[in-house]
Amino acid sequence: MTTETFSSNGRAVAVLVGAGRMGEIHARNAAATASLELRYVVDQMRPHAERLAISVDAEPSTLDAALADADVTAMIVATATEAHDFLVRTGIDRRLALLCEKPLTGQVSTSAPLAQKAVEADSPLMVGFHKRFDPAIAELRRVLRSGQIGELVSLSLISRDPSPPAETYEIGGGAFFDMMIHDFDLLGWLVDDPPTSVFATQSRDVARCAVDLESGASAYLECGRRSVSSYDQTIEAIGTVGAVRILDDEQVVSTTFRDTTDRRRHSTSARTVEAVKPFFLPRYSAAFTAEMAAFGEMALGGRHAGATAEDALQAAHLAAAATESSTASTRVHLRPTRPQRLLSI
């Protein structure tokens, strides 16, 4: 399915729903994206919509009024998680291009029928797993999938915030759905190796999950809210003949091989940063920008980009299994099936 109506200047006209932290990030990126015209900002708190709309030269509006504009062909969903299902269904029914912040919904029971609806409608729907657009992670994926490090032995994905979020920040679905969901998505994107079981634990500030993969390799995921020294975004893949890693909050990909002399290569596509990145926005600013540019192209009838609804559903299955495992203190076994997916980057 493609969107049908464009504005006279050749840009897709968009409405943003949700004027909180993620809404502000998406609004500023949408306003700076050549293929998008951000025309409306909607929020249940009218003053929030007005404040954000003014800052990006858009109009504050209600959802009904914004969707009554026949020029609108795209919607960005940045609300609390519980509103995602209704908004995405509304967008699909109106044949809009959709960018929905993660998670697709807060439960598998609602994500599954929503993903099915998106597939049946061939909806141009992108779920906001922005790490897929990070240049360093994309380079790590290229090395990993090229076979340079041999067969995968283990994969570690570490995400540690420097401090807990503000009390006003709404967390939807607990640590596994709210935070680790990004790395559950990365797991499926980085390696073509279905998970077979998970064992997860959770304390006050740290959640951990061990995942067995069909090939016999394993993955370890950890997310935390108190990394005092930095915003830690470490990824390490160990193979049978080498390793590839992104350490701490650096945007440097290093690959190590074992032979007569150990050698280390730094990819030319990743850059070294001088200062510690204090939080997710400075670290992933380029990824958010690239994500919105890809969404703009998709909204103008281009190819699907980023994570699909089916990708989001697979991540939700892992988050649900991790939640069950943590609650029951037991390993949860998964069906080792390979999902049929839409084309994604």
Image (spheres, helix red, strand yellow):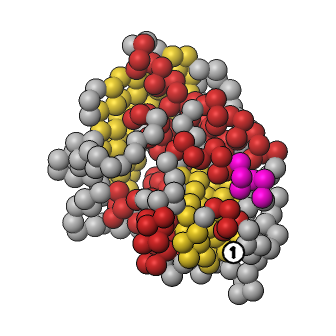
Residue at the spot x=43%, y=78% of the render?
Answer: 55
> Which residues fall within the magenta stretch?
89-94
Label 1's element? strand
The quadrant of the rendering that contains the N terminus is bottom right
Residue at the spot x=69%, y=75% of the render?
Answer: 12
* Rendered position, 142 above or below 189: below
Tell which residue pokes out farthest to the left in this image. Answer: 229
Residue at the spot x=41%, y=34% of the render?
Answer: 174
Tell which residue pokes out farthest to the bottom in this image. Answer: 9
Residue 255 in the image, given as x and y percentages of width and height: 38, 51
Residue at the spot x=52%, y=44% of the render?
Answer: 81
Is residue 98 covered in magenta?
no
Is residue 90 covered in magenta?
yes
In the visual, does 69 lie left or right of 24?
right
**Residue 69 image-quadrant placement:** bottom right
Residue 305 in the image, given as x and y percentages of width and height: 65, 59
Residue 23 in the image, given as x and y percentages of width and height: 47, 62
Given residues 340 and 76, the one toward you in this image is 76
In the visual, does 130 lie left or right of 274?
right
The quadrant of the rendering that contains the C terminus is bottom right
Residue 225 in the image, given as x and y percentages of width and height: 27, 41
Given residues 218 and 75, the one toward you in this image is 75
Q: Main secondary structure of the magenta part?
A: helix
In the visual, does 128 lie left or right of 323?
right
* Rendered position, 317 above or below 46: above
Res. 124 visible in picture: yes
Given residues 171 and 247, the one toward you in this image is 171
Tell which residue pokes out farthest to the front in this image. Answer: 46
Badge 1 is on which residue? 12
Residue type indicated by callout 1: Ala
